[in-house]
Image: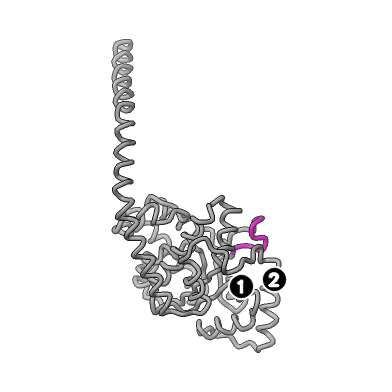
């Protein structure tokens, strides 16, 4: 996102501060980040919980709370576009799993968006998530698959560009040219300007992990990542559909187990709740007697 900003795409003013995990900053709106987390909370999950573990309800976008949060996002979009004469960009990895809501918002506002899928070697992502959030590498790889598959499935032919982190490091000038062309940005710089900008923005010290393609934990990951690197949309659609089918199968298998677990918890808590209720009634009776 920093590079797009350097090529003239305005960002929000409330960008997240740098941290020890990203010393140059995340270039993500703090407000959008917060609202996205609140949307996940309203749906009974978090960004780091795969729907293979907690399947999401079909009507999750229709709840009053989620629609209220969508209205807040809509307000942000309208204010930013008005402020920047119709051109504005943002990024947040959570967007990948919230695209149905964003597509609904975009249609309501009559916008003409450009979508960029920024991806990265899954092993590097897993190492980063383990270091920062303590997420198990296999769980992190599943999350990587889910985020990328959801983008492909929800956007289909609307995906304008796919950019990979390692390509930025290895061939930033060509990647920048690809982005400018695919996004139809009105930028009039020269080839030397592109070299200068990418040299200023892309730095080797940003790469904290550099894994080999063969170091993945799950067999499904390697062909998916290769398809992303090759920008092979036909293959990506096929693999994303397969992942989605597996997700549906997991939901069918796990749902009964989850209901049984919920029943057991309710059975265990019911006597406790009843006992506390009886105790409250007793205390209220004693208090009434004392005050009477």
Q: How many marks?
A: 2
Residue marked by disc 1: 166
Neighbours of disc 1 within 10 Å: few (<14), some (14-19), many (20+): some
Residue 22 located within the stretch drawn in magenta: yes
Left or right relative to 134: residue 52: left
Q: Position of residue 110 (x, y in %)?
A: 36, 75
Q: Work out whether residue 38 or residue 147 is closer to the camera in this orientation and state it.
A: 147
The reply to whether residue 83 is in sight is no
Cα gap from disc 1 to disc 2, whole angstroms: 12 Å
Indicate the quadrant where residue 100 lies: bottom left
Q: Residue at x 45, y 66 (%)?
A: 220
Foreground label between 1 and 2: 1
Q: Position of residue 286 (x, y in %)?
A: 31, 13
Q: Is residue 274 above or below residue 260?
A: above
User: Can you say which quadrant of the picture contains the C terminus?
Assistant: top left
Instruction: Give the secondary structure at mark 1.
Output: helix
User: Can you say which quadrant of the picture contains the N terminus?
Assistant: bottom right
Q: Tell me the magenta residue range.
A: 18-26
Mark linked to residue 203: 2
Q: Position of residue 258 (x, y in %)?
A: 33, 46
Q: Is residue 164 above or below residue 144?
A: below
Indicate the quadrant where residue 109 lies: bottom left
User: Do the CB atoms of the residues marked 1 and 2 lie less than 8 Å apart?
Assistant: no
Q: Main secondary structure of the magenta part?
A: loop
Q: Is residue 140 above or below residue 283?
A: below
Instruction: Specify which label sits upstream in the sequence, 1 or 2.
Output: 1
Q: Residue at x 30, y 42 (%)?
A: 260
């Amino acid at each position: 996102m920093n590079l797009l900003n350097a090529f003239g795409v305005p960002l929000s003013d409330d960008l997240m501060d740098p941290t020890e995990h990203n010393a140059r900053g995340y270039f993500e709106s703090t407000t959008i980040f917060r609202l996205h987390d609140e949307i996940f909370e309203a749906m009974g999950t978090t960004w780091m919980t795969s729907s293979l573990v907690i399947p999401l309800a079909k009507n999750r976008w229709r709840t009053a709370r989620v629609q209220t949060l969508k209205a807040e996002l809509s307000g942000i979009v309208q204010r930013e576009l008005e402020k920047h004469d119709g051109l504005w960009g943002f990024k947040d990895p959570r967007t990948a799993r919230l695209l149905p809501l964003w597509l609904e918002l975009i249609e309501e506002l009559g916008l003409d968006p450009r979508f960029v899928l920024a991806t990265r070697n899954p092993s590097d992502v897993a190492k980063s998530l383990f270091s920062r959030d303590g997420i198990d590498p296999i769980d992190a790889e599943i999350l990587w698959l889910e985020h990328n598959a959801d983008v492909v499935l929800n956007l289909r032919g609307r995906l304008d560009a796919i950019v990979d982190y390692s390509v930025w490091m290895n061939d930033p000038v060509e990647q920048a040219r690809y982005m400018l062309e695919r996004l139809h940005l009105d930028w009039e710089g020269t080839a030397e300007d592109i070299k200068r900008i990418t040299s200023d923005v892309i730095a080797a010290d940003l790469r904290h992990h550099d894994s080999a393609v063969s170091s993945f934990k799950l067999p499904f990951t390697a062909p998916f990542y290769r398809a992303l690197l090759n920008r092979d949309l036909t293959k990506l659609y096929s693999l994303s559909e397969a992942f989605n089918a597996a997700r549906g199968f997991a939901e069918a298998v796990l749902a009964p187990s989850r209901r049984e677990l919920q029943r057991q918890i309710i059975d265990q808590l019911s006597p406790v709740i009843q006992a506390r209720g009886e105790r409250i009634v007793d205390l209220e009776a004693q208090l009434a007697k004392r005050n009477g």
